Image: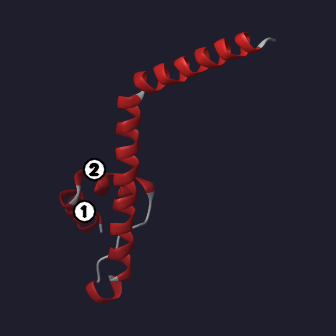
Amino acid sequence: MSLVEKLALGLVIVFLVVAALRLFSAPLKIALRLGINALLGFCALWLLNVTAAVSGISLGLNFFNAILIGILGLPGLGLLLLLQWVLT
């Protein structure tokens, strides 16, 4: 393979990578945002469980709860607490 062919192949690969990133940029942003919100929801659940001895309120640390709190925020936390209160 000559130098010209290697450069042409490299340019085609770079073009395809840039095209794929531009095509999937919106779904990747949404997925990244959902992941960050889930991580923040998990941190909120962890903080709630750390203070459970003082407050008497605890929820399970699982992916569903973290996603719900991450997406809905404080109303999601209230919804989970209300659901726990109703079901117990």
Q: Is residue 18 left or right of residue 40?
A: right
Kindly identify the residue that appears in the image at 46 percent across and 27 percent down: 21
The front one of 20 and 37 is: 20
- Residue at 79 percent of width and 11 percent of height: 2
Decide: is 74 above or below 24.
below
When the figure is inspected, residue 17 is found, relative to residue 76, above or below; the finding is above
Give the residue drawn at x 72%, y 10%.
5
Look at the picture and state if 12 lies above or below 72: above
Q: Is residue 54 left or right of residue 2?
A: left
Counting from the top left corner in percent of width and height, residue 19 is at 47, 19
- Amino acid tagged 2: Ile
Which residue is at the far front?
A: 3
Secondary structure state at the residue bearing disc 2: helix
Q: Is residue 40 above or below residue 19?
A: below
| Residue 77: numbered disc | 1
Q: Bin the neighbour count of mark 2 within 10 Å (Cα to Cα): few under 14, some 14-19, many 20 and up.
A: some
Nearer-N-terminus badge (1/2): 2
The residue that disc 2 covers is 71
Question: Which three-letter amino acid code belongs to the residue tagged 1?
Answer: Leu
The N terminus lies in quadrant: top right
Q: CA distance from mark 1 to mark 2?
A: 10 Å
